[in-house]
Amino acid sequence: GQCDMILTKDANFADGLGLDIQIRTKMVRFWSYIRNAAVRIGHDVIELEGSDDVQDQSVRYWYNMEFKAKDAKTLGGFPMSIRRSHTKMTKIIIDLDSKYPGAKIVMSTYKEFVRVDVQGATEEAFTNTVGLLGEFTTGKTLARDGSVMENFREYGSEWQVRPGEHMLFHTTAEPQFPKKCLEPEDPRGERRRRLEESDVTMEQAEKACAALKDPLDQKDCVYDILATQDVDMVGAF
């Protein structure tokens, strides 16, 4: 679907600095992708945006609401680096090692697509987080009241950013709560029809993703290639 959602949050992260990671999704036909992601630690916010403009090779980020702020060196006191890996990929790395050894939050873009990874996550750092990523220790998809949710459409809507939760992005985009997240009318039927009309086959997608070591990355890679009909999407992994 399409809306602003809470990927994960913890008000007591890093001895009370607090952590919020929010994503802004965009719907295309029967699927959606992350177009923007924003991370807050303490009083600092970094937002990263992808771009589908082949002529725009710049890094698109906002630091405390300022576009390409030159003082974007730390986030809540943690070291932060911003770099362009190649013409299609940007990476922002927030190094949490000083408090949580080996832990990093990595935001990256590939074309218009944005990805957020928490690397080296430990129970000490993330055991109290809530949001779309679920319960850290069990992986359970928990609602705001702590109950387990098994309907993933409803689960996404459950973690839509609400008025009492500070929206981190530099602009407002529809829908905003209480308007519901936008959803495809018939995702299964549309997906089946589109796949039948695909130029890129399942076999081609699997071959392109075969070199990836992580089985989950392979699965996501195949899906992304079939959805976008772009074999180059393997570069996002």
Image: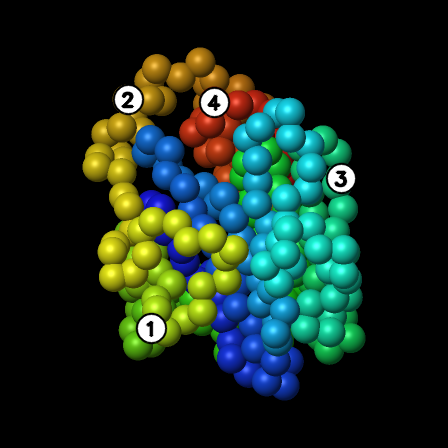
Residue 180 seen anywhere in this rendered image of the structure: yes
Query: Residue 107: image x %, image y %?
Result: 63, 52
Label number found at residue 144:
1
Q: Mark 3 points at which residue?
A: 85
Report the colour scheme.
rainbow
Q: Which of 138 and 184 is in front in this view?
A: 184
Quarter where residue 84 is shown: top right
Amino acid identity at mark 2: Arg
**Left or right: where 193 falls relative to 133:** left
Which one is earlier in the sequence, the residue at label 3 or at label 4? 3
Label number found at residue 193:
2
Mark 1 or mark 3, which is nearer to you? 3
* Whole-number angstrom distance, CA of label 3 to CA of label 4: 23 Å
What residue is at 50 percent from the left and 28 percent from the top?
225
**Residue occupying the far front of the picture:** 66
Instruction: Please tell me whether mark 4 sits on a helix, a strand or a loop.
Output: loop
